[in-house]
Amino acid sequence: MEINITQLIVGFFGPLIGVFVGYILSKRWDLKKQEKINQEKRKRVLTSLREELRKINGDINDWLYKKGSMPNIDFPTGCYESSVNSGNFSLLDKELQSDFTGVYEKIMRIKSKQIEIQKNLIYPSEISSDVISSKERFRDIIHEFTEDLEELNKEIESLVKKLDIGS
């Protein structure tokens, strides 16, 4: 019984090459499929963040229009927090991540200021025992709050425009 080396090599490497090509094609297919899934997730994250920012922007505009009223702006951050906690936020470009993080940090600071303002309206004696200076101080706080809101409003509008252009 003679073993032909050529037949042995062809018999061994033929299927091996077939398995290797199949493996490579399978990996490429999986990568393309995952890339498509990630693009869809990225699109959903951007859409939800854009809508959340539009809602905040609308609420800010409504309050700025009625400046004399008690600040009671709803600052929803659920979409942002959800995208960060789920890991989907990392699918965004680094520049967009930075932009969103900056805006949402500012939203949280302003939300905290709003809570302080509301507390001071409910418990004005905590501001100061001097009523006149308390009113002046409170007026200054509201003025500062309004300026912060106007600045945030511009940043949100800029970011939303950037998202609208990019989509």
Image (cartoon, rainbow, N blue to C red):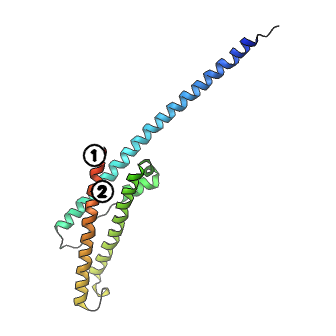
Count of numbered circles in the view: 2
Report the residue at 44% width, 55% height from top. 84
Between label 1 and label 2, give the one nearer the viewer: 1
Quadrant of the rendered image containing residue 124: bottom left
Q: CA distance from mark 1 to mark 2?
A: 15 Å
Q: Residue furthest front?
A: 95
Q: Amino acid at mark 2?
A: Leu
The residue nearer to you, when weighing 96 against 115, is 96
SS at badge 2: helix
Residue 90 in the image: x percent, y percent? Answer: 45, 50
Question: According to the image, label 1 marks what residue?
Answer: 165
Q: Is residue 99 toward the left or the right of residue 150 in the image?
A: right
In the drawing, what numbered circle is on residue 88? none
Q: Is residue 54 visible?
A: no
Residue 148 lies, in percent from the top left, at 28, 69
The disc at residue 53 is 2
Seen at 31% across and 52% down, the residue is: 50
Extreme residue toward the bottom, this view: 130
In the rendered image, the vertical position of residue 34 relative to residue 5, given as above or below: below
Along the line of sight, the residue nearer the viewer: 102 or 45: 102
Seen at 23% across and 90% down, the residue is: 131
Query: Which of the marked residues, 1 or 2, is nearer the chain's N terminus?
Result: 2
Indicate the quadrant containing the N terminus: top left, top right, bottom left or bottom right.
top right
- Residue 23 spot, x, y in % from top left: 58, 28
- The answer, for residue 129, to whether it is visible in the render is yes
